[in-house]
Image: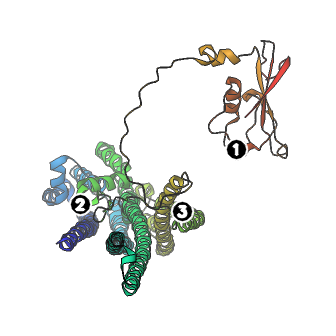
């Protein structure tokens, strides 16, 4: 019956863990769906913009009526879109979609055609939008590949946690079984000794005495074997529990990092250059529109303000807010004790204390190296990002020269081709941009891998540091982890209220004009800095445990600080308190005649 109950308990623990992991995996799947929908929405937006400007270039001669029909066509399409429904629901628009709304509003105000405007729309704006669509598709694929890798890393750490948890359960069960067998052997031994005490050995025959002694030896031998088996299983259980707790901390750290940092960074990768490129395209449109006539400036100012507010960070937050259930971090993995196991922390007692200490130092050394390497990768990543931003924010959207009335149509085309849209410049810019993107994603992948490794090792390092710090306070750690202590009743207050030194120790030892002078021990004169009298005439020794200012104050008041040990300063550390006249100079020098020493 007990084994069946234990099996049900194990099954409940594993079922609880698997449910939590399943929820995380469902979140990861929904994240990809959300990002894919966002990418498709952007591509659809860019396609709509391309079609819009193409149609606008074709109907430039139709003046205001044709432009109004065009604006109404896209406005009706937007009213049925998901973005518009979301906007009607909570007035919450993405910055790029907001720009699109304002462009349509401005289109309703257009009433005249211009040949230069037609040339700019066909040969500049539409080409830019096509390039942005290609960039969105390419960047989403690369970001998705990195996201798949991050998801596999999360699945890997959860599987590792599941494995060590099962191992811990197995060893804990074996430890309990060995403990019960040991108790059974002890009971048999006690029973055998009680029988021996009841019978008089002298009354037994020689054969019976030999048989009884042999039985006692067998019981003792069985007890020794079971005791050795118990200690062996107990050690395995302790190590398995430690591994489980360490992996638990590492898993929680990786999951938290992914939801707090990595998801945001992955969305940034999807947005890489999108807003900047779209801003350049729309600024090209603005530059053309601003030169048509001053009556249209009011509407164009609204569009310019929206373009200036193109903010990838704001759009990212809006996307995450609209899908907050998908992007919110899950609950932390909690420690799940097995069958009443009261130990809920890493055990630092012998014989695993030495192993944990060695593991702690290895982690400390490894972390120092990894942090330096990852910091260098981060600097390279920042420099590459700055290079990409410089490429994507080049100010090449000014087309005011195309609207000079002294220019002919041929000169207008040559000006447009000589600037950004020449084939040679396009090929060169695109090659440089894509090459920089490949290098950036390579470094970004390396940085993510390094930061994940650091966060896992740091979590284990911090837990080991806390555990070993608590373990070092005990000179002889107990064999078993400590159990919760019972509360003790407070002792009654003493009825003796005699005061030492007439009730005021400071008044008792107070001497007019007190200056503390530090006498360094032998062999430390060279290591001590020159005394600075502004801070009490003391200098701090590197690595010392006590603050010199507190040492001086303690000596003046006549007591020894708790955190000062003679081992920190040597065995001959002394504090000389020189008393003299009551006028003490601020620089710590005073005249005095009487001197006394107080051993610390």
How are the colours assigned in the image?
rainbow
Lower sequence index among marks 2 and 3: 2
Q: Is residue 554 left or right of 11 when viewed as pictured?
A: right
Label 3 sits on a secondary structure element that is: helix
Q: Is residue 44 left or right of 202 when viewed as pictured?
A: left
The percent position of residue 442, horizontal first and vertical second, equals: 49, 73
Task: Please name the residue that numbered disc 1 is placed on.
Answer: 544
Depth check: give the residue in front, 294 or 348: 348
Q: Is residue 515 left or right of 22 when viewed as pictured?
A: right
Q: How crowded is mark 1: few (under 14 residues within 10 Å), some or many (20 or more)?
A: few
Q: Give the label on residue 61, or none.
A: 2
Q: How crowded is mark 3: few (under 14 residues within 10 Å), some or many (20 or more)?
A: some
Q: Nearer the viewer, mark 1 or mark 2?
A: 1
Give the Cα distance between marks 1 and 3.
36 Å
Give the Cα distance between marks 1 and 2.
86 Å
Depth check: give the residue in front, 85 or 238: 238
Q: How many marks?
A: 3
Task: Please name the residue that numbered disc 3 is placed on.
Answer: 378
The percent position of residue 327, horizontal first and vertical second, equals: 29, 59
Answer with the quarter of the image where residue 51 lies: bottom left
Give the Cα distance between marks 2 and 3.
54 Å
Asked whether disc 2 touches disc 3, contact meaning CB atoms under 8 Å apart, the reply is: no
Task: Report if residue 592 is visible in the image.
Answer: yes
**Extreme residue in the bottom direction:** 207
The percent position of residue 60, horizontal first and vertical second, equals: 25, 60
Label 1 sits on a secondary structure element that is: loop
Q: Quadrant of the C terminus?
A: top right
Q: Which of marks 1 and 3 is in front?
A: 1
Q: Is residue 482 left or right of 177 when viewed as pictured?
A: right
């Amino acid at each position: 019956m007990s084994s069946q109950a234990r099996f049900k308990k194990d099954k409940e623990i594993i079922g609880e863990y698997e449910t939590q992991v399943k929820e995380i995996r469902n979140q990861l799947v929904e994240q990809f769906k959300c990002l894919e929908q966002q990418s498709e929405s952007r591509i659809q937006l860019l396609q709509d913009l391309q079609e819009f400007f193409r149609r606008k270039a074709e109907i430039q001669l139709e003046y205001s009526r044709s432009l109004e029909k065009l604006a109404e066509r896209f406005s009706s399409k937007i009213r049925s879109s998901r973005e518009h429904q979301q906007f009607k629901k909570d007035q919450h628009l993405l910055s790029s979609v907001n720009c699109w709304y304002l462009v349509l509003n401005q289109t309703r105000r257009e009433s005249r055609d211009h040949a230069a405007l037609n040339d700019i729309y066909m040969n500049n704006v539409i080409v830019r939008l096509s390039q942005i669509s290609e960039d969105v598709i390419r960047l989403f694929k690369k970001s998705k590949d990195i996201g798949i890798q991050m998801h596999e890393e999360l699945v890997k750490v959860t599987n590792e946690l599941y494995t060590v948890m099962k191992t811990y359960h197995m060893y804990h069960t074996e430890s309990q079984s060995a403990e019960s067998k040991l108790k059974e052997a002890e009971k048999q031994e006690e029973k055998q000794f009680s029988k021996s005490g009841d019978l008089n050995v002298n009354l037994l025959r020689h054969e019976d005495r030999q048989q009884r002694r042999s039985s006692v030896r067998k019981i003792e031998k069985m007890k020794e074997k079971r005791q050795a088996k118990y200690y062996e299983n107990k050690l395995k259980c302790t190590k398995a529990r430690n591994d489980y707790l360490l992996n638990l901390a590492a898993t929680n750290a990786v999951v938290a990092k992914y939801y707090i940092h990595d998801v945001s960074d992955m969305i940034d990768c999807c947005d890489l250059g999108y807003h900047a490129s779209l801003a350049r395209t729309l600024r090209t449109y603005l530059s053309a529109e601003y030169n048509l006539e001053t009556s249209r400036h009011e509407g164009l100012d609204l569009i310019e303000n929206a373009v200036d507010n193109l903010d990838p960070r704001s759009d990212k937050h809006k996307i995450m807010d609209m899908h907050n259930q998908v992007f919110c971090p899950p609950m932390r993995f909690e420690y799940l004790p097995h069958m009443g196991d009261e130990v809920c922390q890493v055990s630092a007692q012998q014989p695993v204390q030495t192993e944990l200490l060695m593991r702690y130092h290895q982690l400390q050394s490894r972390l120092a190296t990894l942090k330096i390497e990852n910091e260098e990768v981060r600097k390279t990543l920042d420099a590459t990002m700055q290079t990409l931003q410089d490429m994507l924010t080049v100010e090449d959207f000014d087309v005011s020269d195309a609207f000079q009335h002294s220019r002919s149509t041929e000169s207008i085309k040559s000006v447009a081709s000589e600037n950004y849209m020449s084939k040679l410049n396009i090929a060169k810019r695109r090659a440089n941009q894509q090459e920089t993107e490949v290098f950036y994603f390579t470094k970004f992948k390396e940085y993510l891998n390094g930061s994940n490794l650091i966060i896992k090792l740091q979590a284990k390092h911090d837990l080991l540091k806390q555990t070993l710090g608590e373990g070092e306070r005990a000179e002889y750690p107990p064999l078993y982890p400590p159990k919760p202590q019972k509360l003790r009743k407070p002792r009654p207050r003493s009825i003796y209220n005699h005061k030492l030194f007439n009730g005021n120790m400071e008044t008792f030892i107070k001497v007019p004009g007190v200056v503390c002078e530090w006498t360094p021990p032998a062999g430390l004169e060279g290591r001590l800095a020159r005394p600075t009298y502004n801070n009490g005439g003391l200098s701090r020794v590197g690595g010392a445990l006590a603050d010199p200012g507190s040492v001086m104050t303690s000596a003046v008041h006549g007591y020894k600080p708790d955190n000062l040990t003679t081992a920190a300063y040597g065995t001959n550390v002394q504090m000389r308190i020189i008393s003299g006249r009551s006028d003490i100079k601020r620089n710590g020098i005073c005249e005095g005649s009487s001197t006394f020493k107080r051993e610390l």
